[in-house]
C-alpha cells in the first residue's frame, strides 16, 4: 500500500512535468506565430515614400564601427542616394523600396540582388571587403530609362 502511494505521486509529478513542458512549447509556438513576418516584406505606401521615415532621408546611417544602414529609394530612373561612400570592411544593411514601379537592385560581383517592389521594403546585408567602386544596377525592366538606372558605392 505504501509503495503504491509513492508510485502514484511519482506518476503525478511526471504527468505534471509533461503538462508544463507541453505548455511551454505551445506558448512558445504561439508567441512565434504571433510575431510579424521578419525582414522581407514590410509594408510602405509607395506614394508616400518621400515622407516616410527612414526613406524621407535616403542614404547612409552609421550604426557602429564599419556598420551602416543604407536607406535606398529606387525610382524611374535612378536611386536615392546617388552615391554612397564607406570604408573598406564595412557592412551595409540595405533597406530598399520603390516609389513607383518594380525595379532591381543588383551589385555585380557580389551576391546583392534584390527585386524592389513598390509597397515593400526589402532588406539585405553585405560586407564590402575589397576596395573599389561598386555599381548598383537595375535588373528589372522598368521603362525607357531602365538601362541608365544606376548608383555607385565607393569603398575605400
Ligand atoms: Cu529600374 Cu529597370
Image: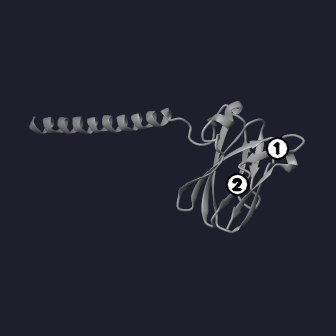
Q: Is residue 110 left or right of residue 70?
A: right
How many marks the image carries: the answer is 2
Q: Secondary structure at mark 2?
A: loop
Classify mark 2: residues with Cα within 10 Å, few (<14), some (14-19) or many (20+). some
Q: Residue 101, image x and y in percent?
A: 78, 36
- Residue 77 is labelled as 1
Residue at image x 40%, y 34%? 27
Q: Secondary structure at mark 1?
A: loop
- Looking at the image, residue 154 lies above or below residue 25: below
Residue at image x 74%, y 51%? 82
Occupied quadrant, residue 75: top right
Nearest to viewer (mark 2 / mark 1): 1
Q: Quadrant holding ligand 1?
A: top right
Q: Residue 38, image x and y in percent?
A: 56, 41
Occupied quadrant, residue 54: top right
Q: Residue 98, image x and y in percent?
A: 72, 39
Is ligand 1 closer than 8 angstroms to the Cβ of mark 1? yes
Classify mark 1: residues with Cα within 10 Å, few (<14), some (14-19) or many (20+). some
Name the N-terminal-most of marks 2 and 1.
1
Residue labelled with disc 2: 112
Question: Could you give the CA–CA distance between mark 2 and mark 1, rounded to whole angstroms?
Answer: 19 Å
Q: Residue 114, image x and y in percent?
A: 71, 47
Residue at image x 88%, y 44%? 145
Occupied quadrant, residue 141: top right
Amino acid at each position: 500500500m505504501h509503495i503504491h502511494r509513492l508510485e502514484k505521486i511519482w506518476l503525478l509529478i511526471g504527468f505534471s512535468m509533461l503538462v508544463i513542458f507541453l505548455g511551454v512549447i505551445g506558448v512558445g509556438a504561439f508567441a512565434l506565430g504571433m510575431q510579424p513576418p521578419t525582414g522581407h516584406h514590410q509594408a510602405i505606401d509607395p506614394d508616400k515614400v518621400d515622407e516616410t521615415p527612414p526613406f524621407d532621408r535616403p542614404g547612409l546611417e552609421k550604426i557602429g564601427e564599419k556598420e551602416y544602414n543604407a536607406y535606398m529609394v529606387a525610382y524611374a530612373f535612378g536611386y536615392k542616394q546617388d552615391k554612397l561612400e564607406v570604408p573598406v570592411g564595412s557592412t551595409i544593411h540595405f533597406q530598399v523600396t520603390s516609389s513607383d514601379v518594380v525595379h532591381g537592385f543588383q551589385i555585380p560581383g557580389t551576391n546583392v540582388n534584390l527585386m524592389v517592389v513598390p509597397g515593400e521594403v526589402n532588406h539585405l546585408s553585405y560586407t564590402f571587403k575589397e576596395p573599389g567602386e561598386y555599381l548598383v544596377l537595375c535588373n528589372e525592366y522598368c521603362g525607357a530609362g531602365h538601362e541608365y538606372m544606376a548608383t555607385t558605392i565607393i569603398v575605400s
